[in-house]
Amino acid sequence: MRRVGSDMSGESITIFRTKVYRAVREVPSGKVTTYKRLARRIRCRSCQAVGQALRHNPFAPRVPCHRVIASDLTAGGFQGKTAGRAIRRKLALLAAEGVLFKDGRLADASRLW
């Protein structure tokens, strides 16, 4: 695994993570993408690998990992969690950008980027 640097905690930032973080920065405010779409964008076959890279995102909020949701248009994960305070925070960040969820799913499909 090639490393290109480290974050403030000393954790390695790999070339793969750098690709993920750069791609997420392209998602505009008020829009979301899915782990699957993001994986395709960087030519990766593993949505889970993308999710793990985002879980360890040391550059938030400059790298807006909260804008990545699950393919079924539910919130997915945030900060390594799939429920509780972390997901409520993700939904609040998205709501502040105008991205709303209804009955647990993205309310407006036009917000999908």
Image (tube, rainbow, N blue to C red):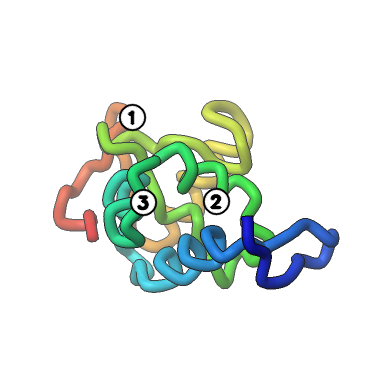
Q: Which residue is mark 3?
A: 44
- Considering the image in quadrants, where does the C terminus appear? bottom left
Q: Which residue is mark 1?
A: 104
Tag 1 and tag 3, C-beta contact below 8 Å: no
Q: Which residue is mark 2?
A: 54
How packed is label 1: few (under 14 Cα within 10 Å), some, or many (20 or more)? few
Helix, strand or loop at disc 3? Answer: loop
Residue 90, position in %: x, y? 51, 46
Going by the image, does 50 lie left or right of 12? left
Amino acid type for the residue under numbered disc 1: Gly
Distance between mark 3 and mark 2 Cα atoms: 14 Å
- Quarter location, residue 1: bottom right
- Sequence order check: which comes first, mark 2 or mark 1? 2
How packed is label 3: few (under 14 Cα within 10 Å), some, or many (20 or more)? some
Residue 46, position in %: x, y? 39, 41
3 vs 2, front mark: 3
Residue 95 seen anywhere in this rendered image of the structure: no
Residue 55, position in %: x, y? 60, 45
Residue at 39% across / 63% down in the picture?
A: 97
